[in-house]
Amino acid sequence: MTRIDDTFARLKSEGRKAFVAYVMAGDPDFETSKEIVRGLPGAGVDIIELGLPFTDPMADGATIQLAGQRALAQGMTLDRTLEIARDLRKTDDQTPIVMMGYYNPIHSRGVPKFLEQAREAGIDGLIVVDLPPEEDAELCIPAQQAGLNFIRLATPTTDDARLPKVLQNTSGFVYYVSITGITGAAEAQADAVAPEVARIKSQTDLPIIVGFGVRTPETAKSIAGIADGTVVGSAIVSQIAEGKPVNEVLAFVKSLADGAHSA
């Protein structure tokens, strides 16, 4: 059982849905980023997605691409991203941290060394968007052998023939991408998402978390209502990009968490 498994078990026993928040490590700068991450659990976040900055983030829209550029310009690295996780673990040993990003920085570090460092830093799971199931031997299976969940994305174009392949080595939860396209591109619609969530649930016992296109407490509530929880990323990153102070960013996060938890 990982922290992710424990969190979903606890939420299920409480009859609550999960709220997952994404932030880019090192945005707008290293110290502010640490402060935001430290504040997320108190703002109602059940699982933290910590973005690993990368120069060529092909699945991300402009908001998160710019966040990655800001972080890289501030000297953000894989090591400093892991340091943000370690910083949270000084005060919080329960909230799961999922590192989300691309394979290149991990490959450059070397998979065995990266997994050892990620475990030591308190990372619980990985979302690596540019590694398909055909490459599971590369990172997915070693990660799970090291005790980390490997979370896969399913999308509106993941048909019934492809879905079993996507699910076969997934653990922790399934991340359903509610829209076709990049992050922050459109608003998620619960009535369109509900049949897809039901289709995936018919193939797996894993929790289904829906992300992309969730920007308001109302949408967080409606999406969480038809899934096991929801993810918000771009809307939170936009608050950071606008230069909002940490307390205002966290107040916005709390409003989203309250929406998801009211589902």
Image (cartoon, rainbow, N blue to C red):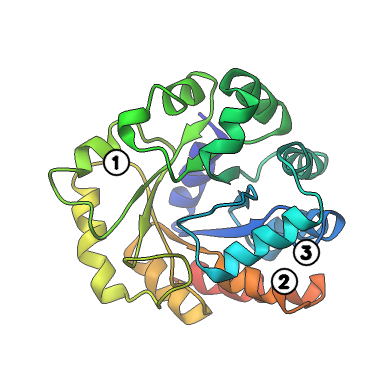
Q: Is residue 90 toward the left or the right of residue 146 in the image?
A: right
- The foreground one among 142 and 209 is 142
- Mark 1 lies on residue: 205
**In the image, which disc is placed on residue 240?**
2
- State whether residue 250 appears in this view: yes
Cβ–Cβ under 8 Å for marks 3 and 2:
yes
Among the two numbered marks 2 and 1 on one chain, the one whose residue lies closer to the N terminus: 1
Check disc 1 and give the amino acid type. Answer: Asp
Among the two numbered marks 3 and 1 on one chain, the one whose residue lies closer to the N terminus: 3
Q: Quadrant of residue 246?
A: bottom right
Residue at 35% from the left image edge and 38% from the top image edge: 132
Relative to 150, residue 39 above or below: below
- The location of residue 23, given as percent across then percent down, is 64, 59
- Mark 3 lies on residue: 28
SS for dot 2? helix
- The location of residue 5, given as percent across then percent down, is 49, 38
SS for dot 3? loop
Residue at 66% from the left image edge and 30% from the top image edge: 118
Inter-mark Cα distance, 3 to 2? 7 Å
Q: Which one is in front in this view, the residue at disc 2 or the one at disc 1? A: 2
